[in-house]
Image: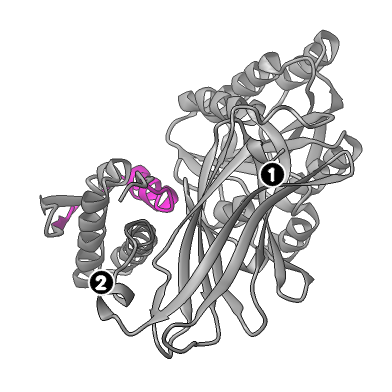
Amino acid sequence: MAGEFRAETFQNEFLPAGTGEVHAIMTVTAGEDTGATQSGRVFGILCDVSGSMEGGKIVAARAAMAKLVDLLPPDCSFFVVTGADEAHLLSPLARADAGAKARAQAAIRDVKASGGTRISSWLQAALAQFGAGPQGVRQAVLLTDGQNDQSDGPPLEQVLRQCEGVFQCDCRGVGTDWQVEQLRRIAGTLLGTTDIIRSPAEIEGDFRTILQKSLGKTVSDVFLRLWTPQGAHVKFCKEVSPEIVDLTGRSRELRPQLREYPTGSWGKGEARDFHFCIEVTPGAVGDEVLAGRASLVYTSQGVENKVAEARILAVWTEDEAKSTRINHVVAHYTGQAELAQSIQAGLDAREHGDTERATALLGRAVKIANDSGNEATAKLLRGVVDVQDAEKGTVRLRQTVAKEDSMALETRSTKTARITKTE
């Protein structure tokens, strides 16, 4: 089984005497022989049908849902939930055979928009359907066009705790009247992605992409385990590619010094990078310790499989040239994290009228994006600032910015550029 995944570690193991903070990047790649190990696959569609969807959005959403149902393979189970103030189970859990698809598509054609938005009820309905389905890859897509009802905050948090670990959910906001942080909170908890759909005409294409990615998943419920020696503690554990996801607060302790972090489902050939920061007891010059051991595990048919492992070292030295050298892979992803922070803080400053701070932060973001080759983010930044010198990070805030451009930059700020790991 170990051949299914490959792992590499990138770090500078040399530390100055008296210090104990160890940084390492672990790259994990799923091999092409990562075969289907699951007994089933369930795909759920959760669609906003509140009053604000009336018009072109509900027409496009109906067409996209119907097409998505049509594309489901026969070995997949599915369900459709429409949501407003309350959830409506439009199409209950069923195998994606011709009859079930026809019934779902007929129900979708009759969907109308009315009411408010209480997303907790939609997720509660989805949870019940996933719970009744087979084990395996469980994926949902949630589409909305507006803000969740303010009173739904506590119920939403409660149901998110119940859904966590049961299924993954990609969230999409159509138009510009929804809040990025609301959807990011849902998708983050449920190990999914968040993105903007600028116009209703793009809903179907986005849904197709989500389904295609879901169908490519072959191993579900993969966990990252991190062992640390006695006296050490994990300061943070983050996925840093293809997107920044802080896993630190999601860990559970299996036994003293061994913690487990959820990473969701994986597909053939998929690659992800993780950044660990471990605080160990400072050593003397010449001391060498194993600061951590990271491994990837999943359970199939009741059997636990360890499929990749990497070692994290700490060596204390008085050679300043060694201890001050920053591994280029660690430096790259530290920069990508700063890029996301600079964008989010810069957009917040712009929103509050602090032009000087916004210019400085977004200029810094332009420089990092340019230096790291993150062209996708650089392009989004150019929708918000006029770039005068990308290498120096010299920019001027645009006087007029389309809300779609600002929201796209905020939503995609955590997407990173992957580094080629060669010295």
Q: Is residue 97 magenta?
A: no
Which residues lie in the magenta part?
395-417
Residue in front for this viewpoint, 113 or 356: 356
Viewport quadrant of the N terminus: top right
Which disc number belongs to residue 354? 2
Snapshot quadrant of residue 228: bottom right
Q: Amino acid at mark 1?
A: Gln
Could you tell me how many numbered marks the image carries? 2
* Rendering coords of residue 341 (x, y %): 38, 64
Residue in front for this viewpoint, 378 or 136: 136
Asked if residue 331 is positioned above or below residue 379 in the image, the reply reads below
Residue in front for this viewpoint, 179 or 127: 127
Q: At 43% from the left edge and 70% from the top edge, which residue is drawn? A: 13
Snapshot quadrant of residue 34: top right
Asked if residue 338 is positioned above or below residue 269 in the image, the reply reads below
Q: Disc 1 or disc 2, which is closer to the eye?
A: 1
